[in-house]
Image (cartoon, rainbow, N blue to C red):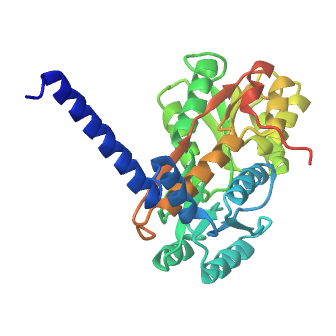
Amino acid sequence: MISRSNCTKAVRAGVAALAIAGFGLATAGGAAADPRTDLFAKFETAVKGKKIAWVPVWLGVLESEWTRVMKSNFEDHGIEFTVRDPNFKSDVQLQAVSTLINEKPDILIVQNPTTTLLARELKRAVDSGIKVIQVNMASNQLTDAYVGADVPRMGRALAQEALAACGGGKGSGKIAILQGEATAAYSLDMTKAATEVLGTDSSISIVSSQPVNWDANKASEITTNVLQQHPDLCAILSVWGPQTAGAAQAVKNAGKQGAIKIFVASDGQPADCDMVDQGLYTKILSYTANLQGEQIVTAALALLQDDRPAGSTQYAFYTTNYWVNGPQDRRFCFSVPKD
């Protein structure tokens, strides 16, 4: 008769033998799949050798920062990256997008100068199987993904700052708004949101709300005229940093630096932070372009790994905004590499 102790020992020996046999079979037939290795293999299959094309409005400081971040990331993953710079010429940009669609990249990334210019071509891209990401300035034609600022939210935030400085009977209550391009979604949506908030205070008067076409000289001209008509202007709201430099200089020339508050939506380029440090801007609301560039990369990598056809998704990646009040907030402005 076998004792209980001997039986237990026999069972344990049998389990060990089975385990060893299983190991031997696994070794003979190849090692068991490692889930982490398998995950990377799937990622590499989805992205390596794919083609991404990028057409900004031009390669200014903001767009160059996006491009730098995209290029370093895409090349690291073995993705072929093509850039076309139309240098602020709408017809050239439209032609570049049209040509690239015919070349069939896996993903097309665009920055829309207006809500309508590229709309038809973006639809054609999606219909032909190309996934499309729109950056910061959206078209009326929605595509697979949008990456950029929550523009209405920025407009409301700027307006709240103006209300705090000029509303409720503080000062004259007179405010001027510097728009960008009149038909650009970024400018339209921000101006609309800011105007709605300012309209909640009866003591506020919007004495000027004009497009300056992203041009600092035009902003200077308009601001100079506004100050001649309204020397008691309380604040200026602007939808973009670089164009505001002209307005700030006009305010300084009029001897009103600091007296007139200047609140600016910014991509976080260094010059905007410099203007705050010098007291030429009261504060800026930065969406930090380098971090936004990383979000563009994330969106592209996600779309490459998504097996669904172009047009199946409408992802949105909204950028977090940060107030820059002085040197202590410099981290929310990116640095331009010297090379």
Is residue 303 among what the camera can see? no
- The quarter of the image holding the N terminus is top left
- Tell which residue pokes out farthest to the left in this image: 1
Q: Residue at x 53, y 75 (%)?
A: 125
Q: Is residue 44 left or right of residue 211?
A: left
From the viewer's side, name the closer residue of 6 and 35. Answer: 6
In front of the other: 39 or 98: 39
Task: Determine the residue positioned at 86% across, 44% down.
Answer: 337
Q: Which percent across, then down, holds residue 216?
A: 82, 47
Residue 314's x, y, as percent?
A: 43, 58
Residue 167, position as x, y percentages in the image: 57, 20
Q: Is residue 277 above or below residue 31?
A: above
- Asked if 128 appears above or below 24 in the picture, the reply is below
Q: Is residue 53 visible?
A: yes
User: Is residue 297 toward the left or the right of residue 65 in the image?
Assistant: left
At 69% from the left and 79% from the top, the residue drawn is: 95
